[in-house]
Image (cartoon, rainbow, N blue to C red):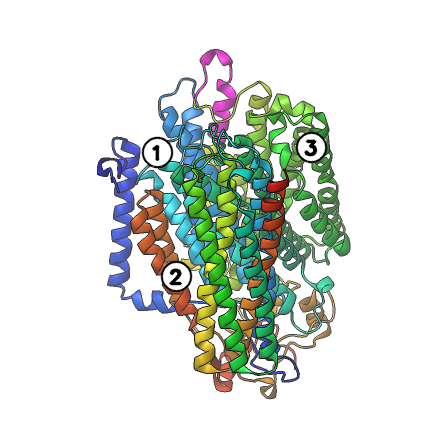
Amino acid sequence: MSAKVDTSLPLEYQTEQDRMNILGFWVFLGAEIVLFATLFGVYGVLYERFAGGPTHKDIFVIKDVMIQTVLLLTSSFTMGIAIFEMRRHNLKGLITWLVITLALGAGFLFMEINEFIHYAHEGATMQTSAFLSSLFVLLGTHGAHVTLGIGWATMVIIQLLKRGLTPTTARKTFIIGLYWHFLDVVWIFIFTFVYLKGLVA
Amino acid sequence: MGIKWDEFFITGDPLILGSQIAILLTMIGAVAAITYLKKWKYLWTEWLTTVDHKKIGIMYIISAVLMFFRGGMDGLLMKAQTSQPEMEFLNSQHYNEIFTTHGVIMILFMAMPFLIGLMNVVIPLQIGARDVAFPQLNALSFWLFFSGAMLFNISFVIGGSPDAGWTSYFPLAGKEFSPGIGNNYYAVALQIAGIGTLMSGINFIVTILKMRTKGMTLMKMPMFSWTTFVTSILIVAAFPIFTVALALMTFDRLYGTHFFTVSGGGMDMLWANLFWLWGHPEVYIVALPAFGIFSEVIATFSRKSLFGYKSMVFSILGIALLSMVVWVHHFYTMGSGPAVNSFFSITTMAIAIPTGVKMFNWLFTMRKGRIKFTSAMLWALAFVPCFVIGGVTGVMLAMGAADYQYHNTLFLVAHFHYVLIPGVVFAVFAGLYYWWPKMFGFMLNEKIGKWHFWLFVIGFNVTFMPMFFLGLNGAVRRAYTYSAESGFEPLFLLSAIGSIILAAGFAVFCYNIYWSIRYADRNISSDPWDARTLEWSTASPVQFYNFAKLPEVKSLDPFWHMKKKNEGLTLHDSEIEEIHMPSNSWLPIYMGVIFGIAGFFLVFEWHIAAAVAAIGIFAGLIIRSFDYNEGFHVTKDEIHRIENAWRKTEGEVHDHVS
């Protein structure tokens, strides 16, 4: 609760409250790992229960998935550059790279929505089979996180524009950065255990 | 949207009609009373928008006592229905609803908030902090819990209660077999309350890791702080599983997916696994803080420091770890085969080891102590034998092969009531008698407290002991009646009589609160029990900033040593500095209300209305994002005035030192 500022540290770590917020967010990411682990577990149990409906090979389009993956992985890299610019106290660079990150994220989302529409046209909906229920909920939860992340980061960008780089705005930016990287890690698991595994099964 | 208005209010049952009228009259009465006494502003500024951990804790406790009443009424109705064979007091549907709401309310809306309430009041004080790490998030946790609890509670008058058991196993809980909206209440209300609990867990982890006062290393923390810390870790590790399980249940029921359904490739036992993956740690989420409370109470009233502190800490960690790997023991009869059942039998029995260590530590703490038989201590003493009965029958149930005999009988029901009532309810009563003076500045009456204690403990044993024997004789749980030829009648009747004694104990408890508010002596010291930990080193009731000067800790039982060595008790004017405190906020209660509204629409599957309400949730989040309120500073003069007011009173430990 103290407002003591330790200027020897990076901006986002300078006050005790900011350090606590960052630790709290790490703990929250721990909870998110459990959440996604449960969804992966559910998918792992149900992933071959087609109930006569389409299978992985019937619906997955590897080319689109590859584009999605490249978009999201790149956005994680640009988010890293954004935080690097923040550490250099370069507000303009920070905002530029954040906007690029969000654009890539939006591109990913656009692809994912198209993918869902494509599945629905193939007659593969959430109600078709247990496999598809678990697939849609796992992908959908990740996609909803990305959507939320874009909205949230937009709020942070507005605050950066209004207030510049302060310990508080730096902390907020840093935390959205952690969140964004986390979503990227989740996607790597989705890519491996959903798409690749589905195509080689 | 297809609203069926004729099914909106539950009609046709005199019991429910009576409740509807009673709820309406109580609400009108409460609003009228607050208006008449002109207390709206006080209520809003001092309580509804508060971010003070002590007030939030008290609100949790008040809600928990109310929920105890509701859950207890459910229990009494069940006992009345089974007191005689072929009884026609409740029909089977009504009975199903009542045992469902009894279970959910007692675990999630009574035990949890009672303990989280005590944690809220005590933990920052015990570790020498001025608040939790995220005060506003703490308020949000409370309002989300409260919102979920209220949503769940209105189910019996509006729309219908869930009726598939507190475990809500599929396929029964699915749309096919439970087409009404009752089970939607279960899925949505528990989701809302669960989000609040998860955030409490995060909050306490950060608070305990980052906000301990100078000198308080982890191994110098009081035991209640330790158990709260480990419980918070369990919350973060287990609640997201429940979040997912409930979300999938919602999808199955509202959007026709096939996670747990019989058709479409779904797997009903997947629900049971997910439920107990959360559900078993949940048992320890409520038991561990209770163990912490007993540790504090037993050490204080034995006037000795806790025996085997390190082994206590390692036992807690061991129990927490094991609690994550025992979930299958809830369904040995699922047919996983001998290998799986054996594994889970062994892990389950292994829990008895660290628990046994704790038992012996408590007994050795009392050994050669100068025990004071206060009400709080009596609860701790009664806990030991009662909980051992629960534990030993737990080991019986842990044996996979033998469990085929006990499964789904009243033996199991008796077992978990013997664990949860001594393990949790006795603990919250002990904690409440013990910390009451810290919260309110007066004590609960000891004489009435002893009536409460004896009635409750005797009633508890008379209610649940017969159920062991009924279960062994083959009486199944969740059956609304039984035949006269079964020969169950005498024990069921005895159990029903016990429940009346139990209820009388609870009534005496409520009377004690009333009596003490009206007549108890206000002129008591801030340390009436001659206690050992830091919360007793500050005023009673605690000033809003907790400590004028943050205490420094050199050993376990810091306050005890401060008193003994006569150091650190006084406050010099030169030591007073301005204190920074967080401001009140209307956002947490707003979020509670809007979550409740959105949840209510979702329960009734009015999706457009729910989506509109959800916009309100996002609006709240955005407002919070742009909220740069930095709090306020308490001036030196004000601290000076507040500190002088209590330190200079007669009998105060801070006064007799020079």
Task: Indicate whether A108 appears above or below A155.
Answer: above
Gap between marks 1 and 2, in whole Å? 30 Å
User: Is the magenta region chiefly helix, strand or loop?
Assistant: helix
Question: Residue B485's x, y, as percent?
Answer: 48, 11
Element marked by disc 3:
helix
Q: State the residue position of label 1.
A: B180
In the displayed orientation, state which residue is furthest to the top: B485
In the displayed orientation, state which residue is furthest to the left: B6
Whether residue B485 is in magenta: the answer is: yes
Check whether the beta carbons of the residues at disc 1 and disc 2 lie within 8 A of each other.
no
Q: Nearer the viewer, residue B629 or B60?
A: B629
Q: Type of residue at label 2? A: Phe
Q: State the residue position of label 3.
A: B395
Gap between marks 2 and 3, in whole Å? 48 Å
Checking the image for residue B618, the label placed there is 2
Q: In percent of the image, x 52 and y 43: which residue is there?
A: A135
Q: In percent of the image, x 43 and y 55: which residue is there?
A: B144
Q: Earlier in the sequence, mark 1 or mark 2?
A: 1
For the image, the number of numbered tags is 3
Gap between marks 1 and 3, in whole Å? 38 Å
Q: Quadrant of the N terminus of chain B?
A: top left
Whether residue B487 is in magenta: the answer is: yes
Q: Type of residue at label 1? A: Gly
Q: Nearer the viewer, residue A193 or B303?
A: A193
Q: Which residues are magenta?
A: B481-498
Q: Earlier in the sequence, mark 2 or mark 3?
A: 3
Co-location on one chain, circles 1 and 3: yes
Question: Residue B360's x, y, as percent?
Answer: 75, 45
Element marked by disc 1:
loop
Left or right: B234, with A144 as reference point: right
Q: In percent of the image, x 39 and y 57: which residue is there?
A: B592
Quadrant in which residue B180 is drawn: top left
